[in-house]
Image (spheres, rainbow, N blue to C red):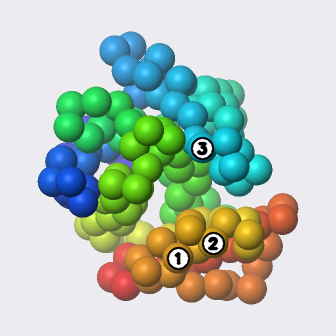
Amino acid sequence: MPLASALPARHDRTGRLVTLGPVTDANWRAVADLAPHDDQRRFVAALGARYLLLSLREEVWTSLAVEAGGRTVGHLMWAYDADEDAHWIGGMLVDATEQGRGVGRAALNVLLDRFATEPGCREIRLSVHPDNTSALRLYTALGFRPTGLLEDDEAVLARTPSA
């Protein structure tokens, strides 16, 4: 999915337009400083900087900045695994101050909308810790289903682009 392709947009529950875009010289610090609620740190990185480093150092993940109302409010990364012929969503983080407004749902829907336009996209996967009940509810509501596979200590969920 080349970033030059236009990504769609969605609205959060407060009516703000949520978009995804590249991490740039102008927004990388805002992405790096993103932090979840303290009780979520066992499920996601303590700061967005970790996900940026994974994208830069591993050369597998593509980091995207989540913007809402003209501000950087989250991070989302994706990758394509040719061995499994699957697109992966990983490293989603919405800043604690922005949670509860539907930003995460809107951001995921933007990415899912984009994946749906890719002719070669057959399956979309993500992994989630079984104790992360709020994330599990969101992913299930978006059509993800358990595969029975595990990635480290997380359950792998999958959906087709048209789900």
- Quick check: can you spot residue 148? yes
**Element class at badge 2:** helix
Question: Residue at position x 40%, y 56% from top?
Answer: 100
Q: Which residue is mark 1?
A: 137
Q: In the image, which disc is placed on residue 37?
A: 3
In the rendered structure, are the residues bearing label 1 and label 2 in contact, judged by CB atoms less than 8 Å apart?
A: yes
Residue type at tag 2: Thr
* The image quarter in which residue 45 lies: top right
User: Residue 56: horizontal and vertical position, in percent?
Assistant: 60, 27
Q: In the image, which disc is placed on residue 133?
A: 2
- On the rendered structure, is 32 left or right of 127? left
In the rendered structure, are the residues bearing label 2 and label 3 in contact, judged by CB atoms less than 8 Å apart?
A: no
Residue type at tag 1: Arg
- On the rendered structure, is 1 left or right of 150? left
User: Residue 67: horizontal and vertical position, in percent?
Assistant: 30, 38
Q: Quadrant of the C terminus?
A: bottom left
User: Residue 125: horizontal and vertical position, in percent?
Assistant: 57, 69
Numbered disc in front, either 1 or 3: 3
Residue type at tag 3: His
* Mark 3 crowdedness (10 Å alpha carbons): few <14, some 14-19, many ≥20: few
